Image (cartoon, grey):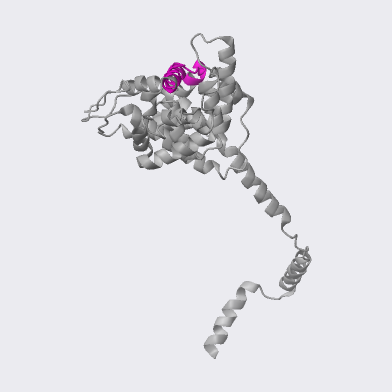
Amino acid sequence: MMGVMASPLEVPVERSLPAADFDRWMASEQRRIFLLCYRMLQDRDEADTATQDTFLKAYKALQRPIELDDPGKWLTRIAVNTCLDRLRSRSWKFWRRRPRQQDEELLLVMTPAGNPSAEDRVFAREIGARLAEALEQLSPKQRAVFMLKHYEDRRLDEIAEILGLEVGTVKAHMARAVARLRVLLRDLYFRHEKPSPAGSGGKP
Amino acid sequence: MRTHLTDDDLIRMLYGVEPQSGHLAECEGCRARWDRLAVRRKELLESRPEVPVDLLARQREAIRDRVLGRSRSGFPSRLAPALAAVGVVVLALVLSRPVPEPQPTRAANDGGLYTEIYSLVESPEPMAAEPIYGLFDNNLR
């Protein structure tokens, strides 16, 4: 029997998943998966297609008896692999356009909700845009590793499981990603702070 | 000399690149910075980026259509640039082919046709009888 941990999905092993249950599960996971695809691909249309592909693959897989410990992690794995495939095939798409105005607007909407101050909201937008731009400079694997940690707060061993990599490899990807994004991350975490006693770079 | 943790050290620890330093237990200042970093991290994770509701609704409908095997559009728009590129290449190939010189085949054919008609008209016997005569000639030989 499939366990229910992160996502409200129960699939009896002896029969396929009823469409209504799938629909409910999809609605609960859709936003997270779309954001993950959007952050990986940095393109609204591509993220839309990748999200659809992810759920379609999941639905097909769930038509057979299947045992899953963590459906959310399993779905994340499908989504990340779908995005990595699209990033690989994108490399020869010479006609790929720059992000459209529509995409930039979406990015602006994706600022923290709640009741942040106007300054925080502007800062969140600015840092979000800078982070999105910086993610483009990472390799697809580095991007996937960093995103799963930064946005989903997954442990390195979980990330390794999702990506089918060794933990050491994940750590190496993470180290490179953090090194590339260090200025941005410092702004993100230490914006309101005075310079550290040791400075921001090397040790004293 | 006492070595404090830098911002970069703390970030590397936060992202699991380095294990948590024992220095945190000894240095109050660094521990306070680490705690503030953890609070900031929690705020970031709890912030919920908005996604337009209509986008999600349209997407769900599209997924349902695909699950049920319905097609919204017979022509996937993302293939349009590829097909347009193929069209341009084919057109370029067609236009770059050397045009052959026109041959006076029509005149020659017309001439042959007139000669054949003339010989038919002038012949004392219909052409259909010739194979029959040929048959007798072969037998005589």
View extreme (front): residue: B1
Q: x and y percent of residue B120 in the render?
A: 71, 71
Residue at the bottom extreme of this rendering: B141
Position of B98 compared to B70: left or right?
right
Q: How many circles with numbers are drawn on the protein?
A: 0
Is residue B114 visible in the rendered structure shown here? yes
Residue nearest the observer in this picture, B56 or A200? A200
Q: In which quarter of the image is the C terminus of chain B?
A: bottom right
A168 or B75: which is nearer to us? A168
Q: Position of residue B109 (x, y in %)?
A: 74, 67
Q: Is the magenta stretch mostly helix, strand or loop?
A: helix
Q: Which quadrant of the figure has residue A55? A: top left
Image height check: is A16 above or below B51? below
Residue B102 as seen in the image, left or right of residue B28: right
| Image point (36%, 39%), residue name | A167
Q: Where is residue B75 in the image (x, y as percent from the top left)?
A: 54, 35
From this viewpoint, is residue B69 visible? Answer: no
Q: Does the magenta run of residues contain B136?
A: no
The spot of residue A134 in percent (x, y) is 56, 32
**Residue B33 magenta:** yes
Name the image quarter holding residue A81: top left
Chain part drawn in magenta: B30-56
B12 or A119, which lies in front?
B12
User: Residue at image x 61%, y 43%?
Assistant: A94
In the image, residue A99 sits, relative to residue B43, either above or below, namely: below
